[in-house]
Image (cartoon, grey):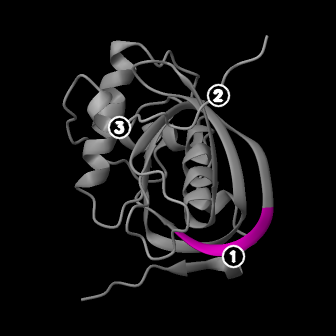
Amino acid sequence: MTTEYAGLAGWTPAALPVPGEVRPVVSAPDPVLSRPGPEVDPTSDEVVRLAADLIATMRVSPGCVGLAAPQVGVSAQVFAVDVTGHPKALTVHGTFVLCNARVVEATRWKSGREGCMSVPDLTGDVKRASRLVVEGLLPGTGAPVRLVTDGFEARALQHEIDHCLGLLFLDRVAGAHAIYQRKVYQ
């Protein structure tokens, strides 16, 4: 059986029939962050509400370009991304949520600095693909999507997919020499 994939096909957060509520973000070592989340039914009311809440929480968090369900205490394969306006972003698909996403192609590996709302005091150098193809399902409709992206958006997608699989960026750094105290700017 072949699946007909499309890009986001015009999907926007307005497609979610519920308003999002801001949820508290959990920090390491909360156990939900180290457990692989189960796949979800993207058409369920619970997942649609979670998608709206992830977007709402991401929007009130300065500098946040992605947020996964485990970061708000929910073990599930759902995440939101929006790299719009980020100076390192090349390809930008806007604000979107994916369920049960998986990487189907990853090339052009590069090291780059990452931070995370769930690891607020540290950053680290992580090697990630700078060209990426991801497949997943849209919340609400369950429509399959295939996104081709690069650069910073590719890094953000890999970071959020890792969260859904129970991994933090700290699990991907080359070693202790590649972890840094987060700088605080006043």
On screen, residue 183 versus residue 136, left or right, reads left
The residue at the point 67 percent across, 57 percent down is 171
Q: Earlier in the sequence, mark 2 or mark 1?
A: 2
Q: Residue 147: image x %, image y %?
A: 61, 43
Examine the residues drawn in magenta and state their main secondary structure.
strand
Assess disc 2: are there few (<14), some (14-19) or many (≥20) residues with their C-alpha within 10 Å of its C-alpha.
some
Q: Earlier in the sequence, mark 1 or mark 3?
A: 3
Residue interval drawn in magenta: 108-114
List the residue tagged with mark 1.
176
For residue 53, above or below residue 162: above
**Of circles 2 and 1, which is in front?**
2
- At label 1, which amino acid type do we have? Ala
Nearer to me, 124 or 129: 129
Quarter holding the C terminus is bottom left
What secondary structure is found at the residue carrying circle 3?
loop
On screen, residue 133 versus residue 123, left or right, reads right
The residue at the point 43 percent across, 25 percent down is 139
Q: Residue 12: image x %, image y %?
A: 35, 37
- At label 3, which amino acid type do we have? Thr
Nearer to me, 118 or 126: 126
List the residue tagged with mark 3.
12
List the residue tagged with mark 2.
5
Q: Residue 10: image x %, image y %?
A: 42, 36
